[in-house]
Image (cartoon, rainbow, N blue to C red):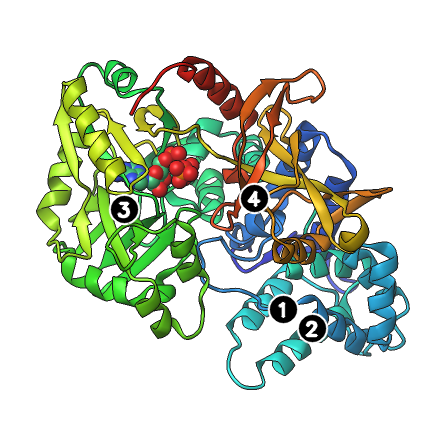
Amino acid sequence: MEGDGWRDIKVVRNPYFSLRIVPTVVPMRYLELAQLYQRLEKTTLKTLKTRLVADFLKKVPNDLLEIIPYLILGDVFPEWDERELGVGEKLLIRAVSMATGVDAKEIENSVKETGDLGESVALAIKKRKQRSFFSQPLTIKRVYDTLVKVAEISGEGSQDKKLKYLANLFMDAEPIEAKYLARTILGIMRTGVAEGILRDAIAEAFHVKVELVERAYMLTSDFGFVTKVAKLEGNEGLAKVTIQVGKPIKPMLAQQAASIKDALLEMGGEAEFEIKYDGARVQVHKDGDRIIVYSRRLENVTRSIPEVVERLKRAIKAEKAIVEGELVAVGEDGRPLPFQYVLRRFRRKYNIEEMIEKIPLELNLFDVLYVGGKALIDEPFIERRKTLEGIIEADGWIKVAENLITKSVEEAESFYRKALGMGHEGLMAKRLDSVYEPGNRGKKWLKIKPTMENLDLVIIGAEWGEGRRAHVFGSFILGAYDPHTGEFVEVGKVGSGFTDEDLIEFTKMLKRLITKEEGKRVWFEPKVVIEVTYQEIQKSPKYRSGFALRFPRYVALRDDKGPEDADTIERIAQLYELQERMKGKKIA
Ligand SMILES: Nc1ncnc2c1ncn2[C@@H]1O[C@H](COP(=O)(O)OP(=O)(O)OP(=O)(O)O)[C@@H](O)[C@H]1O
C-alpha cells in the first residue's frame, strides 16, 4: 500500500468470519515527526542525532520520502525552490489565537517571557478553549500539503487565506506538534540537524555508501530525490545519478595561493588564468526558452534580473545548457562596483525596472557543465572552456571571462597587474586537465589576490550594548564550523565596522534566533553569516577552535551564504598557513 501515503497492515478479527488480514490505512502522523524533533533537540551528540534520523527514515513510506528530508532539516522546500511560506511571527500568532481562542496579546507576552515562540505556541494549544467535533489527528501529508497551499497563495486577501489554512492546522495539533509546526513555519527549527547529519543518516538507514550519497547530493542539491534513490535503487542507483537541467549543482570552489608562482607550480607548470571578477556567482540553466538563474547559495534569483535573463536567451546558442559565471555590477565609469551591489539586485522583489537602470549587470561566464544532452563535468577544464566559447555569442553585457593560458610567471604577473588595474579582485588559476568537482574546495582552482581572504563566519552569540546602545547588540561572537563535531566554535568577537542602522537590523534579525541568555550574553541558532576582515589569524589556546582573529571588522552581511557555506576551522587553519607563507612576500 506504500505509494499512497498509507502503511501498516492490521490484523482484524471479524466476529462473523474466520481471522482475516485486512489492510487498513494508517497514514504517518505528524506526531511521529514532532517526537523526532524533540529527541533531536534534546541531544547535542552528532552520532545520536544521525541514528535518530536514520531510524526515522527507515519508517517513512515511499510517497513521503521526497519531502521528509526537508522537513527534518526544518524547511519545507529545497533552498532552490522559489516557493516561500511568506508567514511572519505576527500572522502565525494570529493563526494560533484563532485556533485556540487564546488572545494574540497573551501569546505575544508569553513569547517575550519564554523567549521561545514554539514553546509559547504549545502553551496556547494546551489552553485551547474549543476543539472541533470533527477534529482529525494531523498527518505529515496534510501538514505538508497545507504548507504548500500557503506558499502558493498570492494576491489580494492572501494573508487572510493563509491565516485560515494555518488556523485549521493548529486547531487539530497537539501541543508538541504545534511547537514544531510553528518553528517550521518561521524557519527556526533549532534541532541542530544540518546537511552532514542528514547525509550520514541516509547512508545508515538504507545501507548505502556515504560517498555516493554525498556525490548524488552535490550533483542535484536535492535531498528528497537522493533519499528516494538511496532507498529504492541503492548504491547502484546513486552511482548513476547525474546532473539535470533545472536542478542546481553545488559550485566548485577554490583555495587561495600565496603567489602566481606558487599557483603555476601547483598546477604543474602551465595553467589558465582568468580574471577573478568581484561579483556574485550564478549558475544558469537553459532549456529552450526557459532560463533559471541560481545564486551561489543555489537560490532561484531569476525574477530579480529579468534583463540578464532576456540577454541570456539570445547569448546562449545551445538549446539546453548549464553555464556558470560571475555577475558584476558596473558603475558609470565602466569599472566594477563592490559585490554588495549585485546582492542588492538579488534582494529586490518590487520595482525591479528601476534597479535595472540603477545597477546595471554584466555577466562573465567561466564554465559550462552541460550542453546538448550531455553532462560535461568529467571533461577536462580546457575542453569545457572551448565548448563554452563555442556556445556563447557575446553581446557586451554577457561574455566569456577574459583569460590567458601560459607557462610564464612574468606573463601571468602582467595579466594580474592588468586585472587589478581594471578594478578586479585578482586572478583565478585553473588546472587545464581538471574535472569539475561539485562542492569541492580543492587545489584545481586557485585564486590569487593581494590581500588575505576575508572570512565568512556565523554569528553564534552576542552581547548587549551599553548606554545609548543598550537596546541593541553591541558585539557579536563569531563561529566557524567544525566538521568533526558538527558544531560552530568561537574564533573571535566583532564589534567594529557596524553603523547604528546595522546594529538595529542585526538585533531585529537575531532576536528570534536566541537559544540561551547568560547575563549580557546571548546565544543564537547558527544561521546568519557575515563577512569580516581581520588583521591577522593567531593561534589561541583560549578558544576551543585553536584560533583567534586579531581585530576583526564587519564588512557585509552574506545573505547569499547559509551556515553550511561559512568558513570552517580547517579553512582557517589553511589560511593561517598561507598567512605565514605570505609574510614578507609581495605578489603584485
Ligand atoms: N573567472 C572566475 N572563475 C571562477 N570563479 C570566479 C571567477 N571570477 C570570479 N569568481 C568568483 O570567485 C569564487 C571562487 O572563489 P572561492 O572558491 O573562494 O568562492 P567563495 O567562497 O564564494 O569566495 P569569494 O568570497 O571569493 O566569493 C567563485 O565562487 C566566483 O564567485
Measured in 3D between alpha carbons, the distance from the residue under mark 2 to the one under mark 4, in whole angstroms, is 26 Å
Coordinates of residue 303 in the picture (x, y in percent): 37, 66
Residue closer to the observer: 16 or 84: 84
Measured in 3D between alpha carbons, the distance from the residue under mark 1 to the one under mark 2, in whole angstroms, is 6 Å
Residue 48 shows in the view: yes
Q: Secondary structure at mark 2?
A: helix
Residue closer to the observer: 403 or 26: 403
- Residue type, mark 1 in image: Val
Which residue is under mark 4? Answer: 529
Q: Secondary structure at mark 4?
A: strand
Q: Secondary structure at mark 3?
A: strand
**Mark closest to the chain's N terminus, 4 or 1:** 1
- Residue type, mark 4 in image: Val
- Closer to viewer: mark 4 or mark 1: 4
Q: Which of the labelled discs sits on residue 325, or is there none?
A: 3
- Residue type, mark 3 in image: Gly
Left or right side of 531 for 336: left
Q: Which of the labelled discs sits on residue 87, or is there none?
A: 1
